[in-house]
Image (cartoon, rainbow, N blue to C red):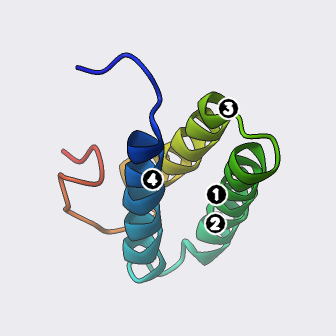
Amino acid sequence: MEDKVSRERLDRYFGLTGRALDVCRGSVVVGREEDAKEIFEMVSNYLSDAKFFDLEKGDVVLAFGAVNYAHGWLDCGVRLGIFDVDDRDLFTVC
């Protein structure tokens, strides 16, 4: 396993999180829309931070951390039943 944050790894995680966000947008549980909205705002903020760290600062380590926080918010929403998904490749689902 690689112990560095490479351009390829960062790009891969941007892609995974983007796919996860698309899945979550299409799977909000009825009655949980406000919770989903809050999660989507946090994901958007962390993805924006990740892009800033990457493109403006050239810091792939901070970018990698921010993109993983974004994905973590989505994963948490899945675990809390805010999103109804069963994709074990993108989320930690039971």
- Which quarter of the figure is the C terminus placed in? top left
* Element class at badge 3: helix
Q: Position of residue 2 (x, y in %)?
A: 30, 21
Specify few, some or many for label 1: CA neighbours under 10 Å numbering under 14, 14-19, or 20 or more: many
Marks 4/2 in contact by CB < 8 Å: the verdict is no
Whole-percent x, y for residue 18 in the image: 46, 66
Can you identify the residue that label 3 sits on?
62
- Residues tagged 1 and 2 counted as in contact (Cβ below 8 A): yes
Q: Residues within 10 Å of mark 3 (few under 14, many from 20)?
A: some
Q: Earlier in the sequence, mark 1 or mark 3?
A: 1
What's the distance in space between the residues labelled 4 and 3, CA to CA?
13 Å
Counting residues from the start of the chain, the first of labels 4 and 3 encountered is 4
Check contact, mark 1 vs mark 3: CB within 8 A: no
Give the mark nearest the N terminus, 4 or 2: 4
Give the CA separation, mark 4 to mark 2. 20 Å
Q: Secondary structure at mark 2?
A: helix
Q: CA distance from mark 3 to mark 2?
A: 20 Å
Q: What's the residue type where badge 3 is placed?
A: Leu
Q: Quadrant of residue 45?
A: bottom right
- Front position in the image: 16 or 20: 16
Q: Residues within 10 Å of mark 2 (few under 14, many from 20)?
A: some
On the question of residue 80 being in view, the answer is no
Kind of residue at badge 2? Phe
> Which residue was labeled with disc 1?
43
**Which residue position is annotated with label 2?**
40
The residue labelled by disc 4 is 11
Q: Secondary structure at mark 4?
A: helix
Image-based side of 21 in relation to 58, left or right: left
Q: Disc 1 residue type?
A: Val
